[in-house]
Amino acid sequence: MNVSTTKLNEKLSVCSQVTIDDLAEIAKAGYKSIICNRPDQEGGATQPTHQQLEKAAHSLGIQFAYLPVEIGKVSMEKSEAFHKLLTELPGPVLAFCGSGKRATALYELTQLETDKMKSEEETVTAACSWTEQAPEKIPVPHGSADKSLSVTAACNWSNAFDIVVVGGGAAGIGVTASLLHRRPSLRIAIIEPSDKHYYQPAWTLVGGGAFDVAQTVRNMADVIPPKAEWIQAAASGFDPDYNLVQLADGRAIGYRQLIVCPGIRLAWEKIEGVQETLGKNGVTSNYQFDLAPYTWSLTKSLKSGKALFTQPPMPIKCAGAPQKAMYLSCDHWLRERTLDHIEVEFNTAGAVLFGVADFVPSLMEYVKRYHTKLVFNANLVKVDGAHKIATFEIKDSEGNVARVDKPFDMLHVTPPQVAPDFLSKSPLADAAGFCEVNPKTLQHARYPNIFSLGDACSSPNAKTAAAARKQIVIVAENLLAAKEGREFPNTYDGYGACPLTVEKGKVILAEFGFGGKLLPTFPLVDPTLPNRFAWLIKAKLFPWLYWNAMLKGREWLTRSTAAN
């Protein structure tokens, strides 16, 4: 039929606004009842009133119920009334509102209570009373009679959370705090195995001797929002058809909505030999908490020789961090008057110094100042720490790849980075392994009750804490809109920030969005030039904002773009 419907279960389907002319088609399709969830006059004079629709429906033998719900006011009281109507009205039933979202939200709230009661009364008691029975699958009501879950999943489903957040990093803690700031009654769980939380953007400063590494770490228990439940376990997979997150310890955690933000993994194994020599033999990396101080130790002790800095293929966390390590080391050697005795080389797997062209001229001035040799299309593939040899695969202009061995006295390695295996191998992943989202709404492309942000989502923005800070607002507001049947209020413009520390005391505050569009927070300051104001923001303001605002649901400097 021409009316586009979405089937939620065997008895109920939903659709957008119907007209009197649609009713004959609806009757022909076999619907016995209609529930109108759209208030009269919401769509203006062209919208038929519920009395007009009811009269026309009765003439066709269709029962009609009017249960108006204003946008943003889906409540448990309304869902209980909706459930009562579904119980009393003959099926199949068609419910409608402006877009179908409020009708769907009413159904989902109804299912939350129904699933709890049924799983407790019919499934969980029986499942948990089994002793040495074989672990067969047992049915659990979840929108379709043919779906089944394991005994463990059935027991967990009865305690499904309103929202489950996978990941306790900047994105996970921040979005949880923002959601609880908006809706304190939400039952939210954070799945995170680590007992430590790190402020990673400062590790480059630690490697340059400009920040105390002890100030970049806190106990995870101290940053988990007080009203959230911390599940200290590792996620091992997703079962989005059943609304479950699988844990490595065998548990399954049920959710009504899911936020995926586990960050990305440092894939050291992609560089042969590097793991055996990290932290010794002059091999270091600012991408690891315990190694950033070693970077500074190497920088201070090197008086002559060869220093190599590397950057792998994208994506990586903070695309400017590899060269920032180089600039800060070079600045120290310049101040100590040893730079003339040190051969500095930056090897990047990319074809350009930085992906946003507006910032390249200023960066090139520092490349010249520090007498740095740039080697493009050079990917580090092997490290022999004992003999201090780094092996690169270098591609020439014709696409030919050759292996080149380079000696070093200091080697700063930026590791390749990938999505966690439990995400990349799950139904949520795109072809590259990241959580597949609409880049403007950050809602999953195929599962509407799932959102993602931070480094693990597929949005093509710079993977930085600053990007997560803006994404938090988008996800918090859009997720609640989806939950309450409202239109999404915000869209994401791809904002990311990479404070390019080019010397101790000066930073180029690179802020940009999709397509490299410049998005400066302070437009009166030329964003393409290094300045001390940006250094103070990077070294003083941002760390304070991180611990005291971003992780606590205070959304300062987080403007967003209104949805069209």
Image (cartoon, rainbow, N blue to C red):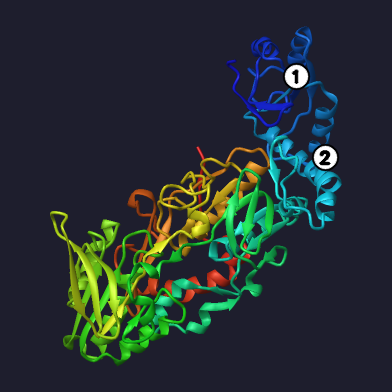
Residue at the outermost top position? 59
Instruction: Look at the image and tell me whether residue 558 can be seen.
Output: no
- Contact, CB < 8 Å: mark 1 with mark 2? no
Q: Position of residue 179 (x, y in %)?
A: 65, 55
Residue 304 appears in the picture as rendered: yes
Q: Which residue is mark 1?
A: 50
Q: In this view of the protein, which residue sits in the foreground, 534 or 155?
A: 155
Q: Is residue 173 above or below residue 489?
A: below
Percent of width and height locating residue 249: 65, 64
Residue pictured at 59% horizontal, 61% vertical = 235
In this rendering, position of residue 152 left or right of residue 525: right
Q: Secondary structure at mark 1?
A: helix
At which x and y percent is residue 245? Answer: 63, 54
Q: Residue furthest left?
A: 398
Res 483 quadrant in image: top right
Percent position of residue 425, x then y: 49, 53
Q: Is residue 10 left or right of residue 518?
A: right
Name the kind of residue labelled 2 in the image: Glu
Query: As shown in the figure, which amino acid type bears the numbered disc 1?
Result: His
